[in-house]
Amino acid sequence: MSPQSGLQREPLLEALRNELNQLDKEELLWRIRTLESPSAPHARVDGRNVLVLCSNNYLGLCNHPKMKQAAIAATRRFGAGSGSVRVIAGTMSLHVKLEQVLARFKKAESSITFQSGFAANAGTIASLVDERDIVISDELNHGSIIDGCRLTKAERRVYKHRDVGDLERQLQGTAQYRRVMIITDGVFSMDGDIAPLDAIVKVAREHQAVVYVDDAHGDGVLGENGRGISSHFHVEGEVDIEMGTFSKAFGSVGGYVVGSKDLCTYLQNKVRTYLLSGSHPPAVAGACIAALQLVQRQPSLVRRLWENTRYFKRGLQELGFDTGNSETPITPVIVGESGKARKLADTLFRMGVFVQPTVYPIVARDRARVRTIVTSAHTQRDLDKALQAFGKAGRELRLLN
């Protein structure tokens, strides 16, 4: 067929450049800063020594000596890579040990690990539901959950954020579906609030629905000794699928799912992100094992995290900042417009405090913020310095009365 007469297509690179320019004008363009030292409370970023308040390194494990030792020892024994996907020749004894240690930590029958939390969500959701099923998802769930749902042919419904009453309404009229799956984040990553998992589990049982929880920001943070949201609400064993990640409180990288042995064996045979991706390098598996052991042996890590969280959150609120509905170490400082969030982050960086603005589409256009996360490795002196900087920047930018 000949090209349509008169058709003018915008060249790809020109279109991308125009869109980037528009994002820049609207203060919606990510400006990535570069760490030049380990992830720690004090780091060198873009040539400046700064206090870091925006990493997910909740327990300060990224640069822990035992984590580094474990990674080095694993590399010396097993090499730099696994050489294959898990189901062919890429399952090493280290991977098996990691999954055993993880299952015991989460008080689950079995576990399966993935290359990332995103891969765990995208692959697992797509493997468990199809056109015969329906997924009912919290409206503020993480993008990896949303994309996992999009990869399926299942019907989709969304319930109002943390609204169990609306969840019950969405569960009405679902008798024709083979499987009804309720999916929620445990801790919501932008606002730091917690899903009412105990109530969700109760409603799910009444409607014979499956419960899927993404506990990425609950691992190492909530529950007995950081065991997560199921422990926090005392519903261990009642959540059908619990997903999590090693890239936050556990200081490494990788996703996982814990649950029944049958569930994990099924996922090993069905999930494309597991079947078709190379397995973790030995150093990663070794570091993840060390992280789980450290959290179990040093409960003071979690206690210190919560002491710092309460202190810093109270300080921000006393200054007059809007911290939303945060219940966890994730504490947003909500300023409204994206330009205000950018200016606040830039001003704080000049003062030696590293935070990043979070803007649309990650949050609503009128809910732009800088998202702060304290860790157990911060000292009170660190937090006082940060609060002083927030106060000064807030007054300078007229964000505070």
Image: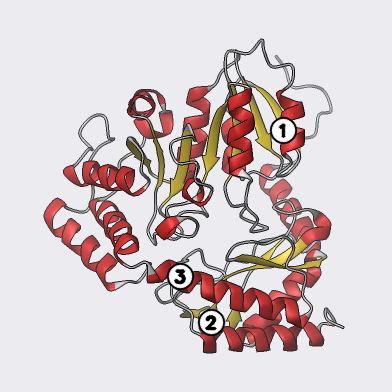
* Camera-nearest label, 1 or 2: 1
Q: Is residue 181 visible?
A: no
Dot 3, how many residues are within 10 Å of its Cα: few (below 14), some (14-19), or many (20+)?
A: some
Name the residue tied to disc 1.
167
Image quarter hosting the N terminus? top right
Instruction: Return the disc, 1 or 2, that comes first in the chain's sequence.
Output: 2
Q: Position of residue 123 (x, y in %)?
A: 47, 32
> Are the residues at dot 2 and dot 3 in contact (C-beta closer than 8 Å)?
no
Instruction: Return the disc, 1 or 3, that comes first in the chain's sequence.
Output: 1
Residue drawn at (48%, 79%), measured in percent from left and top? 378
Task: Indicate left or right for 29 with 40 as reference.
Answer: right
Res 51 label: 2
- Using the numbered discs, state the Cα–Cα distance from disc 2 to disc 3 in whole angstroms: 21 Å
**Mark 3: amino acid:** Arg
Q: Is residue 149 visible?
A: yes
Q: Position of residue 169 (x, y in %)?
A: 77, 27
- Using the numbered discs, state the Cα–Cα distance from disc 1 to disc 3 in whole angstroms: 33 Å
**Mark 2: amino acid:** Leu
Res 303 label: 3
- Give the residue at the far left of this rendering: 77
Residue drawn at (52%, 70%), measured in percent from left and top? 306
